[in-house]
């Protein structure tokens, strides 16, 4: 009798376990239909570019960190070829493709390979470094395409699927869940994107590929991973579909993106700061500095203000502010609520435009008009702030650097202060313009500048004109 009871109990337990396993299996999503329908609209992207470097005829020059004297043998330019791989996806039947800006940045040629093995040389319609998005166009019709999902439908915990070319392996699929939304991951070029964080396996080559919801709609564009090894560690970041739609529409319309610009340097508010400023909790963005002649300065913002609301939306941390500002059109008047001296004040600020030219963000905007010079630079006089902060007697401030120019090849960036060109000092714009106009072509010359207060010296060469 006891044996029969034991057998019956064992059968019941086995049935319950089997039923539980079946129920769990039934709850897991099925990805096959989604992948079969969506993969034909995903593309593989390869790029190529030629890089020119300066090489000394004697290897490492003893004057690399100093001025090159006229008698020292001048280095000759050396060329090398490089390329990159990434992914993208079609958003129209006539060949418009979305990918990451960093996939195609600086490329001499962009090649697109479709699911059916056809290959095309793509035109770069426009690129936006601040969102890390680019729009390409190939000459083809009747192509498969993908649709963007509505951003407000995405929830943490939702299943998502990525398709791309990790390590060049075509049309690889991986799945996971949404781990978080609205991530600000700190990099200066990413401050305008509230990233989607997932645990989907993303690796080099997935960049620019689509992230799908279970309806086969694109909820994000895979952009970055956090990893010490360079491979997937279960922490990947995608650009939300609503950001992508806005950026793509502007790139398609005019090849560039217009963003609001406030002109402040900000940091997070910690618990102690919150208490000292009369806040109940650490929220908002603390203003460290205000750009001279910026919308913020004109609107009355001051260092030590804590911005707690922008255009009617609460600012929870400093990472939110660039995202909120960047999504408002230049020229728009907005309310900015600040905590100042323990009191709440609301200021009216008319936003300027955040300039992004040649793939480089110009945070302050040039006060001096005109085109780029023969070195590929747009410059401005330095103000008193730079003189005092870096203890400079003179110099000119780099506002813009043209890609593939002598200045870009040298490594100059917006924000650098040039104090010497050739063998002569640069104190004013007039000094610089006179020297730049007289520089001989195809000769390597020293250029000395300050970057974040640190002196640097490199060489620059103007090609034969």
Image (cartoon, rainbow, N blue to C red):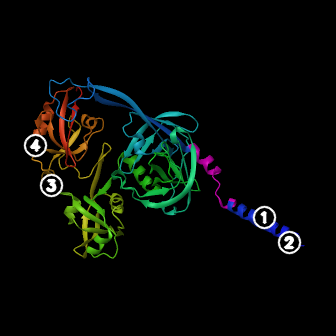
Q: Earlier in the sequence, mark 3 or mark 1?
A: 1
Image quarter hosting the N terminus: bottom right
The reply to whether the C-beta atoms of the residues labelled 3 and 4 are less than 8 Å apart is no
Distance, label 3 to label 1, CA atoms, is 77 Å
> Do we see residue 434 in this rendering?
no
Q: Position of residue 75 (x, y in %)?
A: 24, 25
Looking at the rendered structure, the secondary structure element under dot 4 is loop
**CA–CA distance in space, label 1 to label 4:** 86 Å
Q: Secondary structure at mark 1?
A: helix
Q: Would you say 389 lies left or right of 189 here?
A: left
Alpha carbon of mark 3 to alpha carbon of mark 4: how far? 15 Å
Chief secondary structure of the magenta portion:
helix
Q: CA distance from mark 1 to mark 2?
A: 14 Å
Of residues 154 and 207, the one nearer the viewer is 207
Q: In the rendering, at what x and y percent does residue 387 appear?
A: 12, 51
Give the mark, 1 or 2, whose residue is nearer the N terminus.
2
Report the disc number at residue 427: 4
Q: Nearer the viewer, mark 1 or mark 2?
A: 2
- Residue 79 lies, in percent from the top left, at 34, 27
Judging depth in this view, the residue of 60 and 403 nearest the camera is 60
What range of the chain is rendered magenta? 25-40
Q: Which residue is mark 1?
A: 14
Question: Which residue corresponds to mark 2?
Answer: 5
Q: Is residue 426 left or right of residue 274?
A: left
Nearer the camera: disc 2 or disc 3 = 2
Q: Earlier in the sequence, mark 2 or mark 4?
A: 2
Residue 413 position in % (x across, y down): 26, 43
Question: Please, is residue 26 above or below residue 125 in the view?
Answer: below
Residue at position x 65%, y 58% from top? 28
Asked whether the beta carbons under mark 3 and mark 1 sit within 8 Å of each other, the answer is no
Vertically, is 299 above or below 371? below
């Amino acid at each position: 009798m006891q044996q029969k009871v034991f057998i019956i109990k064992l059968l019941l337990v086995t049935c319950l376990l089997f039923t539980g396993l079946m129920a769990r299996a039934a709850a897991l999503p099925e990805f096959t239909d989604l992948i079969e329908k969506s993969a034909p609209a995903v593309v593989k992207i390869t790029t190529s570019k030629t890089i020119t470097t300066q090489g000394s005829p004697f290897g490492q020059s003893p004057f690399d960190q100093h001025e090159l004297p006229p008698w020292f043998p001048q280095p000759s330019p050396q060329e090398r070829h490089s390329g990159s791989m990434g992914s993208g996806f079609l958003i129209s039947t006539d060949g418009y493709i979305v990918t990451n800006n960093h996939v195609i940045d600086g490329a001499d040629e962009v090649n697109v390979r479709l699911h059916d093995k056809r290959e095309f040389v793509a035109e770069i319609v426009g690129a936006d470094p601040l969102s890390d998005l680019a729009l390409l166009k190939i000459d083809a019709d009747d192509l498969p395409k993908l649709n963007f999902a509505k951003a407000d439908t995405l929830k943490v915990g939702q299943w998502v699927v990525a398709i791309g070319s990790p390590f060049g392996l075509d049309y690889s699929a991986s799945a996971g869940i949404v781990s978080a939304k609205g991530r600000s991951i700190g990099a200066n070029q990413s401050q305008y994107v509230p990233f989607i964080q997932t645990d989907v396996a993303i690796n080099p080559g997935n960049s620019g590929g689509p992230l799908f919801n279970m309806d086969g709609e694109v909820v994000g564009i895979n952009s970055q991973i956090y990893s010490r090894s360079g491979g997937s560690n279960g922490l990947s970041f995608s650009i939300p579909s609503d950001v992508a739609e806005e950026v793509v529409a502007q790139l398609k319309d005019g090849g560039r993106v217009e963003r609001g610009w406030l002109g402040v340097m900000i940091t997070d508010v910690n618990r102690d700061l919150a208490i000292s400023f009369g806040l109940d909790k650490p929220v908002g963005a603390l203003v460290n500095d205000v750009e001279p002649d910026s919308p913020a300065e004109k609107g009355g913002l001051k260092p030590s203000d804590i911005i707690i609301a922008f255009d009617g939306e609460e600012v929870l941390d400093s990472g939110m502010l660039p995202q909120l500002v960047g999504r408002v059109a230049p020229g728009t008047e907005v309310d900015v609520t600040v905590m100042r001296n323990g009191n709440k004040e609301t200021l009216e600020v008319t936003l300027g435009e955040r300039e992004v030219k040649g793939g480089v963000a110009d945070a302050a905007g040039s006060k001096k008009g005109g085109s780029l010079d023969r070195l590929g630079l747009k410059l401005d006089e330095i103000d008193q702030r730079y003189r005092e902060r870096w203890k400079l007697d003179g110099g000119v401030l780099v506002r813009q650097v043209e890609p593939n120019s002598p200045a870009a090849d040298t490594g100059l960036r917006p924000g650098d202060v040039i104090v010497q060109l050739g063998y002569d000092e640069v104190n004013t714009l007039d000094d610089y313009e006179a020297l730049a106009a007289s520089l001989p072509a195809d000769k390597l010359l020293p250029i000395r500048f300050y970057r974040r207060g640190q002196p640097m010296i490199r060489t620059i060469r103007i090609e034969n004109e």
